[in-house]
């Protein structure tokens, strides 16, 4: 099996870093520090959140929320002493293309 290697341009590298900064700095840090203004900065006016169903981890239950309503729901974590995100395997696709072929 061979994979097409796509050359990264400076523009692509900058876009990837901007996406990464947005996800880590605004999304994860905003939630983990309960800084809802920072967290809100990453969201559009509506967001679709997709979590596994209660009866099966393989079942998907996507729901569209108004962002302010979503943040109201997410604020339930304020009662915890702390929270943390462990994130890895970032894959950014541009113009509808992933950097490697799908299986």
Image (cartoon, rainbow, N blue to C red):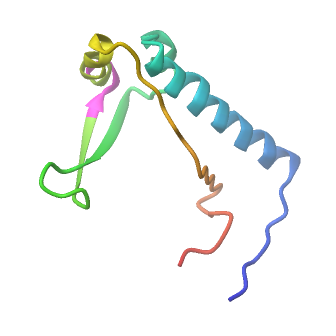
Compared across the picture, whether 31 is left or right of 24 comes to left
Give coordinates of residue 35: x percent, y percent: 46, 10
| Residue toward you, 103 or 98 | 103
Compared across the picture, whether 85 is left or right of 2 comes to left
x 35%, y 13%: residue: 81
Compared across the picture, whether 73 is left or right of 32 comes to left
The relative height of residue 49 versus residue 40 in the rendered view (above or below) is below
Residue 66 is drawn in which quadrant? top left
x 87%, y 46%: residue: 10
Please state the total of marks drawn on the protein image.
0
Residue 9 on the magenta span: no
The relative height of residue 64 versus residue 99 in the rendered view (above or below) is above
Compared across the picture, whether 34 is left or right of 4 comes to left
x 42%, y 12%: residue: 34
Residue 67 on the magenta span: yes
Give coordinates of residue 19: x percent, y percent: 64, 37
The relative height of residue 69 versus residue 90 in the rendered view (above or below) is above
Q: Which residues are magenta?
A: 65-69
Quadrant location, the N terminus: bottom right
Predominant SS of the magenta segment: helix
């Amino acid at each position: 099996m061979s994979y097409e290697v796509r050359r990264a341009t400076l523009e692509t590298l900058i876009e990837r870093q901007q996406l990464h900064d947005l996800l880590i700095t605004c999304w994860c840090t905003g939630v983990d520090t309960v800084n809802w203004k920072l967290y809100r900065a990453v969201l559009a006016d509506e967001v679709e959140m997709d979590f596994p169903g209660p009866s099966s981890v393989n079942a998907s239950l996507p729901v569209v929320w108004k962002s302010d309503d979503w943040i109201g729901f997410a604020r339930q974590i304020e009662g915890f002493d702390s929270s943390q995100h462990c994130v890895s395997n970032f894959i950014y696709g541009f113009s509808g293309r992933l950097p490697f072929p799908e299986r």
